[in-house]
Structure formats: C-alpha cells, structure tokens
Image (cartoon, helix red, strand yellow):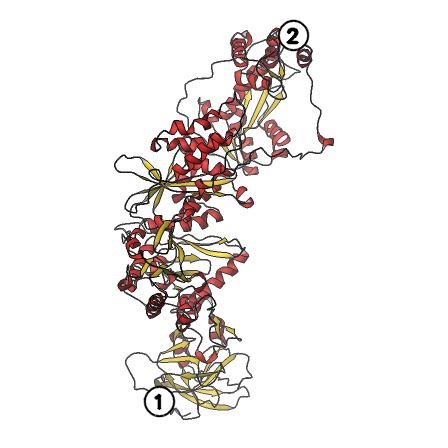
Amino acid sequence: MTERSGHYPDPADPERLCLAVNHQGIMLGHQADALSKMASAQQELFHRLDGLSQTLLELTGQFSGSAAPAPAPPSVNLEPSTSTSNPENYRLQPEPFFEPLDNPINAAGLGGQHLSCITHRTRPVLLITSGNHHEYIRFFVTTSPHSPVVLGYSWLKVHNPQFDWAKQRVSNWSGFCLANCLQSAIPPVPPAIIPQLEDIDLSSVPSCYHEYKAVFSKSKAGSLPPHRPYDCAIELLPGAKLPKGHLYNLSGPEKTAMETYIHEALSSGQIRPSSSPVGAGFFFVEKKDKTLRPCIDYRELNQITIKDKYALPLISSVFDSVQGAQVFSKLDLRNAYHLVRIKEGDEWKTAFNTPIGHYEYLVMPFGLTNAPAVFQRLANDVLRDFLNRFVFVYLDDILIFSRDPIQHENHVRLVLSRLLENQLYVKAEKCQFHATSIQFLGYIFEAGQIRPDPAKLEAVSQWEPPTTRKKLQQFLGFANFYRRFIRNYSTIAAPLTQLTSVSKPFTWNSQAQEAFDQLKSRFISAPILIQPDATKQFIVEGDASDTGVGAVLSQREEASSKIKPCAYFSRKLSPAERNYDVGNRELLAIKLALEEWRHWLEGATHPFIVWTDHKNLAYLRTAKRLNARQARWCLFFDRFNFTITYRPGSRNTKPDALSRKFSPDDALPPVTIIPATCIVGSLTWDIETRVKNAQGEETCDTPCPDGTLFVPTSLRSDVIAWGHSSRIACHGGVHRTLSLLRRRFFWPKMEKDVREFIGACTICARSKSGNSPPAGFLHPLPTPHRPWSHLAVDFVTGLPSSQGNTVILTIVDRFSKAVHFIPLPQLPSATETAKILVNHVFRHHGIPVDIVSDRGPQFISQVWRAFCSALGASVSLSSGYHPQSNGQAERANQNSKPASVVSLPRTNLTGPSS
C-alpha cells in the first residue's frame, strides 16, 4: 500500500501493514539502536513468504477504527477477533503513526523479485500481545496483501511465546518477558474461545437460592477482586530493617509444581513480577494426599509490621439476638483472604523469591499478621446493617438466624445478594441451610437456646475408668490441680487414693466408680469450668505422650489470680503420628489445640501464652531451619499472636494426664528381632554359682526383682568384691558397681553396703584423684552433627610395661563419646601416628572433619598438617598449658588410668602421666 505521511490507511483498504525482516532473520526496527543502523543501509531484503517461511509468524487481521494523532504513543493491540474463533485473525487498534525515512529501503522476496520501496516507518508503537505483553517497536511500512504485522525469527527467539493450541492463546513467555515485558496478570480468555460456561455445583443449595448461583462460582472467586477501601495495608515499624530474601532449593517435581502455580497465579491476576527489595522464602510442603502446597514464609515481615488492633467479634455478643431463633444457616466464604486486594503501593512488601523470578501479591495472601483484622473489617462493613439482627460474622464464617422459615429465606436472600454485590463468594459444599440445630464457634444453637459444644468437654466426660494403678495415678494427678475448686475433695477422692497403695491389690469397686464419676462431673461444671472471656488473656497448656495428645484452655481469674479451665481437648495419635519424634508430637499437640479453639484464639485481644514441657519449642517462632511438617504448621501458627513458654513437666500435669488417657494398660509383648541361631549364650560366673548354692541359708521378706538372685549375708562381701575389684570391673565407682550387681543380684540396703565397701578400698584411694577440680574458663567446642566427624586425640605415657607397651593412644569421637585405646611400645612419630589413625579409625569410621589434639611434637609438625590437609580435615590445637581445650580426650584418659593401674601386677603401681 502506498503510504502518505501524516495519514492513516483506510480500514476498508485490502492492503495490509507488514513488519519487515532482513535476510538474517533480524526484525527491522525492533530496538532504537538497530533502527538507526538499518535506516542507513541502502537496500534490505524483505522476505514475505505467504506462510511458507519458517522464520516468520503471521497474524492476519484488519484495522478497526481510526484516531487523530495524540501526544501519547499509539498502540497496536494483537488480540483475537470476536467475529471468529480463528486465533490468526486479529484486529489492530488504534492505527500507528508514520514518518518518512531519510533513505528509502528496497524490499524483495525470496526469488529476488522487487516487492516495494519502503519509504516510511512508524513512530514508537506500543505492541500489546495477549493482553499483558507490552513493548515499544518501530515498524517499517510496506504493502502486503496477506499480513498486517509480521514478527520475525529474532523476536520469537527472544520472547519465545508458547502456544496453547487447544485454548488458542499464548500460554507462557520467556524469562526475558517475565522481567521486562509482562505488565500484569494474563487476562481471561476472550469470550469467543471460551469452550463453555462454568458448571456450578448447587446440589447442596436449596432451589430457592439457585438464582444467586453466581455467588457460588469458583472461577469468579479465583479472579482478581477490585480495589476497595478495605484493601490490606502493610505498615512497617519506623526504622525497621527490611527482611532479607531467602531462596530455597527445589526438587524436580517441586520446580514443575512451582512453574504451574506461578503461571496460574499470573493468569488469575493474584501475583505479578516484582522488583521489590524484600523477598520471603517460597517452598512447598507435602499434603496428606501427596500433592504439593505452596508456602511463603512471612515471619520476618510480620515481626516488623504494625499490628492492626481491629478486634474480632465476641460470640457472646450475639447471644441475646439469637434467643428465640428457630432456623439457622451457615455460610463459608471461598478463598476468603484472596477476595481482598493489597493496598496499592504496598504490593512490594509481599514479594517472594522463586528460582524463575521475583513476584509480589496483588491479593492478600495467607500468613500476614493483619489478615484476620483486615478481613473482619471488610465483612463487618459489608453486612453492617444485618449484624446482630439476623447475621453474625466471624472472619469467613457467617451465621444467619431467624424465627421462622419464611423470614429465614428472606434473610438468606438478602445476605447472598449483598455478598454478590460486593464480589464475595461462598463455598457451597461447606454451607448449611435451614437447620434447626447448628454448631458454630464452639456452641450449639438449637430452638432458641445456646449451649456449649459437648466436644470441648469430651476429653474429660469420656475419660474411661482406670484399669491399672498407673492410670489411676495419672487421673489423680490431673484432679489434684483442681482440688482447691472442689469442696470436700479429699472425702470424694478417698476411695481412689486408697487404691494407689502398693500394699493392697488394685481392685476397682463401686465406691471407686462413684468417686470417679463425681470428680468428672465436677471438672465440667462451675465453678471449675468457666466461660471464655475474649477480653482476658488465654493460656494454652499442651502435652503429648507416645499414644495421644492433650491440652487445656485456661484463663486467670482476676479476683483470686487463680487459673481456671475453659475447655479440655485430647486425641489419640494415628499410627503415622506415633512415628513422629518427641518434638513433633509436642508441636502437634499445640497445633491441634489451636485448631480446636481457633474461634477464641485467632485475633484475641491479648497475645496468649502457650505452656509446653518441651524446651526446644520455646524457640519455634525464631527458628531458621524447619522440616517440611514444621514449616507447614508454622504458616498456620502465623495466624495467631502468642508466645511459647517452657514449663517443666512436673508443673504441666493437666495436659500430660489427658495425653496419657490412650496409653495401653500393659506394655506391648516383646518381639524377637534376632534369630535364635544368632543369640550368644549367657556367661555364668563362679560367684553366681556360689550364690545359687547358698539360696537356702537365709530368707528374704522383700520379693526379688525378676531375673535376680537373693544374696545371703555371708556372701555379700564376696559379691561386692566381684562387682568392684575383679578384672572385668576395674574398680568402678558406686553407680557402675551397683549397675553391674543389680543385673544379677539383690538384697536389702545394697547401695549402702556398696558405698561402704568402695569407701574402704585402698587401691581406689591411692589410684584415683579427686574428680572435682576447679572448672576454669572452659569453652565448649562446636557440637558435631554425626558420629566420627570430629575427633579428640591424646597420649597416655609413663605406664608400666605390659607386653612391651608403655604408651596408650586415646582417640575419642566427640559426637558419641566412643573411644579407641591403642597400646604402643613408645611415643610414635607424626608419620607413625598418621598410619595408626588410618589403620585403627579411618578404615572403620571414615575421614573426619576436624581433629583436636594438644601441642605435642607429633601434632605441630609439617608432616601432620600435610596429612590432615590431604584428607580435608582441619587441625585444632589446644591452648598452651591448658589441657581443658581437649577435655574429652583428657576425661577419657582420666577414666582409663585407674583401670590400667589396678589391672597390672602389684609390683609396680606408679601412676601414668599424659
């Protein structure tokens, strides 16, 4: 087509615009610097192949509309035409501006034939592709009967659009586009190519509300909501240090899931590319169905965020309004937090890092500390004229109550209509309509009455009668904490306390059952159990055993400052949960308790306290390294404002008793794990035979433990001498001697006799030094993380000769405290020491990371340093004249000296030195 400067082509003109490409496949005018170079060329080849070329992508269409020139750059919008479903038909709007070239450019086809002379090009044009891909391009203008715009191979190589042929749209762009071209979320698929309308499941919704089916739409709930006055603002503490970004390593499946999530979130408009200076960690945790759930760690951001003090409503505030109500409905909002936008300008604070880019949320994500308050403010204002008349709303839970079915239907219609007007959507599968009895936030609403949910008392009311003395002691331990609130507690509990005596057989009778039932009824009634008061601070006590978890929700009474319970909780652990380590079981108890009492604890007026007898959990909120399960739970914990405080187990008796309700009556039967052919026969000692032969000499009033022999008075000195002075005992201390003797023997006051015997042992008095020297200024070495990765070595010298050996090399594993004692004829050289370690330690346990030693000549030599360097092990030398630096090796030497001395012949008892 012939171009005229300052004019636009006629929309009805069959001629088209075309983007020229040179013979090297470089798009002419793609960048300003490239344009200047190409403009100076006298002649360029223009390949118009009419669909045959492999280096061109043609998007055909026609101009629609025209506009006068304006100061702002015009745009070319490549989008599917509504007149056809063919993705190759696009309209261009508005039309570009043209300007003449200083040097015309000849365009030729593949066969060399002259096509046209290019005399004009466009001013910078905003090319909009697929709705959100923006870039400025200068087009060369020529006649083309087939293609209005042609994008060349180099453009495709840089932008790399990936087409979804089934949905007939661009599904993804290159990393260059994610960082430079994509301006916002991918727009929804144009109506012309949407295959069909959303099929909304209304099977659980009464037919009278089907006219509001749009409020139950999943797709609309997942779209980008509008800005409202209730947008989530994130205000940071003045002068607070911005949180550093963390980038987590992801596995292959996690990378695939991450790319899918990012693309879907971009498509729905929930996120966009970001250049924020902050970035939270992005990772995945595995759900119960083995699928992956994306998680973002906003703990550091929450610490520097100014807290929103908007209070969550008190359930007690609706009690008067509900009196007389007969019909109830309960609604649950879908994607509740994602229905709120982040305040414009604060999106950068929600940024998170991924291996494929940096993104930020446009909607309110889960995990922000102010999310409950922000959403409650929105819900209250949307339904304000309904509140406490026939509606009560707590975050995403809405209760509708009425006096009769006709009135109730009108109330539900009003609420559904109001939600739809404000683009708040409901999860149909979790709603309950037209019920005469409904459970809501820990209470049962029924026939104009309100009563506590029996589930919060179930942990105590369903406590089974104890079948063993141990179970009875656990119940009484729980009861003793509340004895001050029960009148005549001692009289009531007397039949139970009598059964705890070991002098009487345990027999459960009617008096015990009556006392047991009476105490249980007292626990779940006033004045023991009080109603929660959201204006006061809550205390959550949690504990876990091998078989169950238990928790107590309490508050402190102002008048007496005594702690009184509000609710109880206990649950039996599943087989999988029993495999958790003790830390995860204790953490599970806290998580389940917070889930059970979420309606009281989430958004509480005062930060609540969690008491646990597992000390490591006190550092949970600041932990840097968490496993997948802990990370998933921590995202749930971020919804609450609480502190974890360590409380010794002796003071944590209430939840401990609840958690042990599920312990089996008897221990599990032993299971043989070693074949009988592999079992080594037990050793029989002479002293043991003598004790067996003397069994009839004396009787014992106290029953002997299973597997032990009663020792008569005449043989007790010999038995103690065997357990203390024999070569296998090596003159051990009181505890070691007692441990050895109790495996086989028993007699009353055994510990007293052993202490007197060892106190009179002359060999121990001469050979053993005091074990309480001044501690000095000791500093512990770093704790190893695996066995035999960190070693401590030292020599014991000056020993009497034994089979030609006078030196012992002591090698200690600082992780497991395991020791190798290697006898040597003399002090070895550095080379010999290296060979000894290789033959006796490294060949069995592997190469260590660090070796601690004193400053002996073997360990400061160049040979030793070269040896350790070749192994990749570091050399750590103790301070001069300060053997405490190598404390573990010195302690092992101290323990070995008496044993080596007392085991030698009595001709030489000169003590060794090290």
Name the secondary structure under disc 2. loop
Res 181 quadrant in image: bottom left
Question: What is the CA distance from the residue labelled 1 to the residue labelled 2?
Answer: 125 Å
The tag on residue 8 is: 1
The tag on residue 665 is: none
Q: Is residue 168 above or below residue 62?
A: above
Q: Position of residue 738 (x, y in %)?
A: 56, 17
Q: Is residue 806 above or below residue 197?
A: above
Is the Cβ of the residue at disc 1 closer than 8 Å to that at disc 2?
no
**Residue in the image at 48% along x and 88% along y:** 146
The tag on residue 697 is: 2
Viewer can see residue 177: no
Q: Decide which of tag 1 and tag 2 comes sooner along the chain.
A: 1
For label 2, count other residues whose C-alpha is less than 10 Å away and answer few (under 14), some (14-19) or many (20+).
Answer: few
Residue at the limit of the structure toward the right, as seen here: 677
Amino acid type, callout 1: Tyr
**Observer-nearest of 718 and 170:** 718
Viewer can see residue 841: yes
Name the secondary structure under disc 1. loop
Residue at the limit of the structure toward the front, as seen here: 510
